[in-house]
Amino acid sequence: MSCLHRSHLRVGHDLSHELQSSRLSMRWPDLESRADGVSSGLHYGFQYIAFFVQHGTCNGGLYSRPFKESFEETPMLVAVFTYLGYGILTIFGYLRDFLRDWKIEKCHIAREREEQKDFVPLYQDFENFYTRNLYMRIRDNWNRPICSVPGAKVDIVERVSHNYNWTFDYTGKVVKEVINMGSYNYLGFAENTGPCAEAAAEVTMKYGVGVSSTRQEMGNCSRHEELEKLVARFLGVESAMAFGMGFATNSMNIPALAGKGCLILSDELNHASLVLGARLSGSTIRVFKHNNMQSLEKLLKEAIAHGQPRSRRPWKKILILVEGIYSMEGSIVRLPEVIALKKKYKAYLYLDEAHSIGALGPRGRGVVDYFGLDPNDVDVMMGTFTKSFGAAGGYIGGRKELMDYLRTHSHSAVYATSMSLPVVEQIITSMKCIVGEDGTTVGRDRVQQLAANTTYFRKHLQDMGFIIYGNHDSPVVPLMLYMPAKIGAFGREMLQRNIAVVVVGFPATPIIESRARFCVSAAHTKAMLDTALGAISEVGDLLQLKYSRHRIVPSLDRAFDETTYEETEE
């Protein structure tokens, strides 16, 4: 057995004692013993898990601030009717397929051609059926074209369908001044006026739009290098790299960091770009339950104790993949605990801050800033410029040796065209604004305004009786719809009230956990939020969406008996 393997075994043997001493271990008392009635929880099936970190003294000092997340269980009656709704839709779907086979009803798309039936199908059977018979009924809620800046308000091009959403025709009308609750414009930098737009326009006139080459050939400009130095300074790391596409930042760089003989431990709710990157790497992939440190610890122990399958050799490296804010759940990664486990087991940590960079932390520097942690404890810091910065592309930050390696081994760095310079200037200007290097407090004010808007919006939705998922500080706010018929109805009713929302269903979520996802922005005024909340409450009453049985959640003024995690089953 190698020295590396023996050291890992020793770490794994001593970990349970060390974790207990630092209060990373979990205890599960009865929820009813809590007189305060706090109802934050984590939902797995119909299990209700209350998760709460109240003071910095809890959890061995890992948390320096209160950490509250709410994942209320699905009411049993709602779950039954949701399954019943999908069952009815499935029965009618098979009936309509029967009519299509007999040429009684016309089928427009999503069917294999007659001459190709003996080939491997292009569609998986259920996804084909789902698209044809369920998704098409509510397709008008997605891909709506806008014709304005995606700011706090947007203009939407009106369209109609005369064949049950198979195709759409434009009416020539525009729905104006629609409150935008769906875009990832967290800090309000998606705008066509102000210093960012002016700087981008100036650079466009000087350099043009395209670069027409890769960074390793003729596409490396001084503005690219300035951007990377600024990003490194913003993150608090030695060096950084910028890429032209956020999705490719994950999918093309993870294969450069891990390969055959490596183990990737991935959160079950990680973004598709992380999943694709892990698969392309050729590494062994194991999935742990969402934000569940017990599940992650178990996989780490098994990896250290057993090594690679068959050969039992130690893994070349173990890479943990997590996100800062999970875009469908609104939850925030338990980063202090992930770092503690990563250190104990000598693993590497890859943190995707696509939604959290700019949107979390007192300085807007992401989940590391939010928890007050050392950026050097995260081996690979990844994020995107598409959300808080109102631009495009992504970045990776870390040690200089890592960046030098990626510059020669990353497919995105070697083969992809360089980032457009107007986009680079948008990022530089907005980031300097956040840091305060523009000589103003505009960036800091926007970070504070986003935090205030998030708290206000979440609190009022919970007080209304909706089931809201996620962390109390997360600007991603999922509102649970559950039933398939209510997905389309909610989106349409909200648009009639001049509120643009995003509704989400299978396969982006579990089939019975359909939801509406709101994204709060610093650009939203209190009047806009009040208008949106009034419309949401009205539609919630109309569609009977106020499922929560824990409408009043009083604030907690005292710590529990040093208990960090609690679970109960009804």
Image (spheres, rainbow, N blue to C red):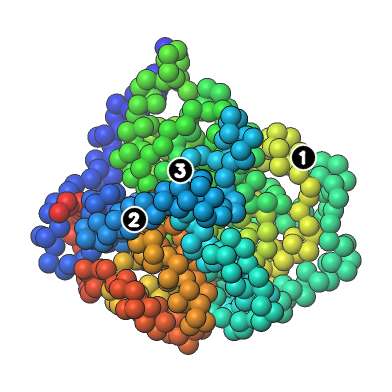
**Is 442 left or right of 134, judged from the image as shown?**
right
Which quadrant would the N terminus be assigned to in this image? top left
Dot placed on the residue nearer the N-terminal end, 3 or 2: 2
Query: For mark 3, what is the residue?
Result: 126
User: What type is the residue that disc 1 sits on?
Assistant: Tyr
First along the sequence among labels 3 and 1? 3
Determine crowd level at label 3: few under 14, some 14-19, many 20+ residues with C-alpha closer than 10 A: few
> Is label 3 in a helix, a strand or a loop?
helix
The relative height of residue 418 versus residue 462 in the rendered view (above or below) is above
Residue 243 location, x and y as percent? 70, 49
Query: Would you say the residues marked 1 and 2 are in contact, meaning their CB atoms lie under 8 Å apart?
Result: no
Distance (Cα) linking label 1 and label 2? 49 Å
Q: Position of residue 269 (x, y in %)?
A: 43, 47
**Residue 398 in view of the camera:** no
Q: Is residue 559 visible?
A: yes
- Residues at marks 3 and 1 touching, judged by CB atoms closer than 8 Å: no
Whether 531 is drawn above or below 556: the answer is below
Q: Which residue is mark 2?
A: 88
Q: Nearest the camera: 219 or 8?
A: 219
Residue that sits furthest to the left in the current view: 33
Q: Looking at the rendering, which quadrant does residue 215 occupy?
A: top right
Q: Nearer the viewer, residue 469 or 406?
A: 469
Any mark on residue 415, and which? 1
